[in-house]
Amino acid sequence: MAKFAIVESELSKVRICLRCKARNKAGSIKCRKCGYHVLRPKRKSKRVKK
């Protein structure tokens, strides 16, 4: 995780394309790379192995 809280909050605003896995801006509606309209927010925390 990032050292500073401000940086951490900015990194978590990123949206990820479900088709090509590209990173997009926070307010984007479609992917900048492939034009796909289904985007998910970036995960807030790391996954833990079971």
Image (cartoon, rainbow, N blue to C red):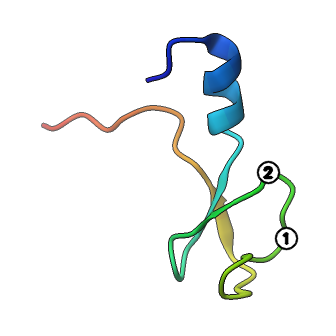
Q: Secondary structure at mark 1?
A: loop
What type is the residue that disc 2 sits on? Answer: Ala
33 sits left or right of 27 in the view: left
Which residue is label 1 attached to?
A: 29
44 relative to 42, above or below = above
| Residue 21 image point, x, y percent | 51, 71
What's the distance in space between the residues labelled 1 and 2, CA to CA?
9 Å
Seen at 55% across and 75% down, the residue is 18
Q: Mark 2 sits on what residue? A: 26
Crowd rating for badge 2 (residues with CA inside 10 Å; few <14, some 14–19, many 20+):
some
Foreground of the two, 15 or 4: 4
Numbered-mark total: 2
Residue 47 image offset from top left, x and y in percent:
31, 38
**Tag 1–tag 2 contact (CB < 8 Å):** no
Q: Of helix, strand and loop, which one carries label 2?
A: loop
Q: Is residue 35 left or right of residue 40?
A: right
Instruction: Kindly identify the residue that appears in the image at 64 percent across and 13 percent down.
Output: 5
Report x, y in % for residue 29: 85, 70
Q: Position of residue 43 (x, y in %)?
A: 52, 44
Task: Give the quarter of the image for residue 25.
Answer: bottom right
* Residue 40 picture quarter: bottom right
Residue 8 is drawn in which quadrant? top right
